[in-house]
């Protein structure tokens, strides 16, 4: 897909959202069911069933997906798609590219071993490796706009309010 095709595809959507901002407010959903045999949660991905369980560092078998890995995978996926869309829109030719994310966790926090150990990632590093002949100022712009428009990155970075509730089924 080139910049012209991308603009043509997105133009009517952008026009609609400009004319009716409420149309742009969409609720994405995720759903999972608790596994009745194992310490696991079956997450419906829309394509297949993903079974998430404990990370081996917390006693898991390693056979199920780790939700921390899934968070990093979502970041990589979103950042990669965003980078590709921005590069296309700006007509920055990419010969190839790779996106990686890694995050540091202190599992003492989630296991309740040390009250001073945080629960969650202490740091996340997102890296783009691109093969291109584009000048550095174009790459700087590409990175800036990828950060700006990547939903998962902005969500992690901004920490929106999260409402949690429990109810009987």
Image (tube, grey):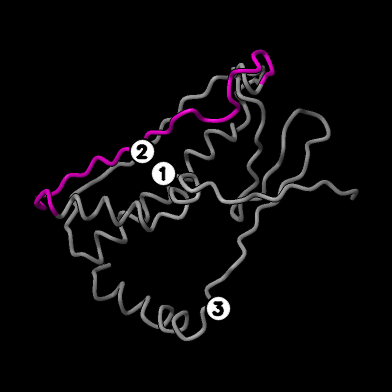
Residue at coordinates 65% horizontally, 58% vertically from top-left? Answer: 29
Nearest-to-viewer mark from 2 and 1: 2
**Which sits earlier in the primary sequence, circle 1 or circle 3?**
3
Residue 75 % position (x, y): 45, 44
Residue 72 at x, y percent in the picture: 47, 38
From the image, tell me which residue sits under label 2: 126
Spatial CA distance of label 2 from label 1 is 8 Å
Q: Which residue is mark 1?
A: 76
Q: Nearer the viewer, mark 1 or mark 3?
A: 3
Work out whether 23 lies above or below 117: below
2 and 1 marks in contact (CB < 8 Å)? yes
* 6 with respect to 96 (left or right): right
Label 2: few (<14), some (14–19) or many (≥20) C-alpha neighbours in 10 Å: some
Q: Which image quarter: residue 130?
A: top left
Residue 23 disc label: 3
Q: Is residue 121 shown in magenta?
A: yes
For the residues labelled 2 and 3, say whether their Cβ atoms are less than 8 Å apart.
no
Q: Work out how far the residue at label 1 is from the one at label 3, CA to CA, in angstroms.
A: 27 Å
Crowding at label 3, few (<14), some or many (≥20) Cα neighbours within 10 Å? few
Are there few (<14), some (14-19), or many (20+) residues within 10 Å of tag 1?
many
Q: Residue furthest top?
A: 113
Of labels 2 and 3, earlier in sequence is: 3
Choose the circle earlier in sequence order: 2 or 1: 1
For label 3, the SS is: helix
Gap between marks 2 and 3, in whole Å? Answer: 31 Å
| Spot occupied by residue 111 in the image (x, y as percentages of width and height) | 67, 19
Q: Quadrant of the N terminus?
A: bottom left
**What stretch of residues is rendered in magenta?**
111-137
Above or below: residue 48 compared with residue 67: below
Please state the horizontal and vertical placement of residue 69, each as a whole percent of the image.
52, 34
């Amino acid at each position: 897909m080139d910049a012209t095709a991308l603009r043509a595809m997105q133009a009517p959507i952008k026009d609609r959202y400009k004319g009716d901002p409420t149309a742009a407010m969409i609720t994405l959903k995720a759903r999972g069911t608790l596994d009745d045999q194992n310490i696991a949660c079956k997450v419906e991905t829309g394509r297949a069933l993903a079974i998430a369980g404990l990370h081996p560092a917390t006693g898991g078998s390693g056979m199920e997906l780790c939700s921390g890995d899934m968070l990093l995978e979502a970041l990589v996926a979103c950042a990669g798609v965003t980078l590709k869309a921005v590069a296309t829109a700006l007509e920055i030719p990419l010969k190839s590219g790779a996106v990686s994310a890694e995050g540091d966790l202190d599992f003492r926090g989630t296991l309740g071993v040390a009250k001073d150990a945080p629960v969650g990632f202490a740091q996340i590093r997102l890296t783009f490796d691109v093969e291109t002949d584009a000048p550095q100022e174009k790459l700087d712009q590409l990175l800036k706009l990828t950060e700006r428009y990547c939903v998962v990155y902005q969500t992690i970075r901004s920490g929106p309010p999260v409402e949690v509730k429990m109810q009987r089924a």
